[in-house]
Every structure is written in C-alpha cells, then in structure tokens.
Image: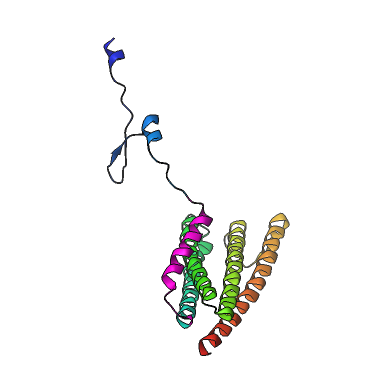
Amino acid sequence: ERAAEQKVQTPQTTDLETGEVSRPKTSQEASSEPAAVSYSPHESHSLAVAEKANKLRCLDRIALIRGFRKTQEARVASYSKFETKLHPMLKSGVFNSYPAACSEATAEFATLSADAKAAILVLEENGATEASKITARIQALEGEKLTLTAALHLDEIKRRKACPAGEMDDVESLSGELRRDILMIEQSRNAIREKLGICVLAINEALEELTMELED
C-alpha cells in the first residue's frame, strides 16, 4: 500500500556537457505555455534579408555597390576554403568530415546570399535600375554556380570511392563495369566543369559592368 501511495516522480535527464538537470514537462505544463514560433529555412532567409536591408538603407548607390563587391570577394574566399577541405578527403578517400564541411559552407553561403539580396533590394528602392539589374544577374549566376559546384563535388567523391587506391589516373587499365562507371562519372564531371566555366565567365563579365557603374 505504501508503494501505491508514493508519488510518481517524473524522470530526470542530465546534460552531459553543461551538467544541467532537467525533466520532461507534463502535458498540463506544456499546454499552459505559449507555442514557440518556428520558421522554415526560406522564411528565416527572407527575414535575414529584410533585417540586413534595413541596415543598408542609409547608404548611397556607390556604397551599396562596393558592399556587394565585398560580398563577392567573400564568396570567392568561401569557395577556396571549401575546396581546401575537400582536396585532402579526395586524396585519402575518407569523407567522414565532408558533412560538417558542407554544413559550414552552406551557412556561410546563406549569409552571403542574404547580404547580396539585401543590397539588391535597396538598390532597387533607390532607383539604381542598372546596378540592381547587374547585381541581380550576378546573384542568379552565383546560385547556379553553387548548384554546379555541389554536383561536381559529388562526382569527385563518387569517382574516388569507385576507383581503387593507386588507380586514380589509370582508368584505361580497369575493365568491365568499374571502368564503365568511372568513365560515366568523368563524362558528367567534364560537362559540369564546362558549365561552371561558362558561369564563372558570365559572373566576371557582370562584375566588370558593375565596376563601370562605380565610375559613372
């Protein structure tokens, strides 16, 4: 009877990192709390653009263009850092750290994309029609470049995983299904590289046009 009379204790959990002790909320406690506001990634990105645009509205056309160019420079640096992390993985054939590298790069590119979109938005509001068109074109090309780069990385990883150690540059010596698969990956990789080259060229040409806007 005493056991039946004992009050049931809610299980507790301990955060091993902080040492904080917590327990799950009862249904009554949970229902009395206001629901937390959550946003989709797209909504969060739009909010970030709006917040950044508010901070840029005090700038003139020249300052906005210069800021956009700095964002482009930061993008180049982010690509370089990502490539630097990928190369050792391709050499070793170990890709355990690739998801973390992807997550870091994705966060960086999302922030830079929001920076660029905010500048484009304020340029449009200020009536800088030509500059806003050029920057919007660059932003669209950067989206395409990012998609192509991700696809290229996947092909690079697939090729490395498919090819035995020591045979990376000697595909012709392979036979059968393995050789066919690797040749298909290389065909895809070469096509992506060609598209990337065209995309980068278009970005550079647009940046030259944007430089002329600074001189007007």
Tell me which colouring the rendered structure shows: rainbow
Q: How many marks?
A: 0
To which quarter of the image does residue 144 belong?
A: bottom right
Query: Residue placed farthest to the bottom in the image?
Result: 215
To which quarter of the image does residue 25 belong?
A: top left
Q: Residue at x 42, y 42 (%)?
A: 35
Residue 154 image offset from top left, x and y in percent: 59, 60
Q: Indicate whether residue 40 is drawn in magenta.
A: yes
Comparing 59 with 8, the one in front is 59
Q: Main secondary structure of the magenta part?
A: helix
Instruction: Locate the N terminus and report the quarter of the image it occupies.
Output: top left
Give the residues in magenta: 39-61
Residue 204 image offset from top left, x and y in percent: 58, 80
Comparing 203 with 213, the one in front is 213
Q: Is residue 46 visible?
A: yes
Query: Residue placed farthest to the top in the image?
Result: 1
Q: Residue at x 44, y 47 (%)?
A: 37
Residue 186 image offset from top left, x and y in percent: 67, 65
- On screen, 36 above or below 162? above
Residue 49 image offset from top left, x and y in percent: 48, 64
Q: Is residue 26 visible?
A: no
Left or right of residue 80, residue 186 in this image: right
Comparing 211 with 91, the one in front is 211
Q: Indicate whether residue 11 is drawn in magenta.
A: no
Left or right of residue 177, residue 125 in this image: left
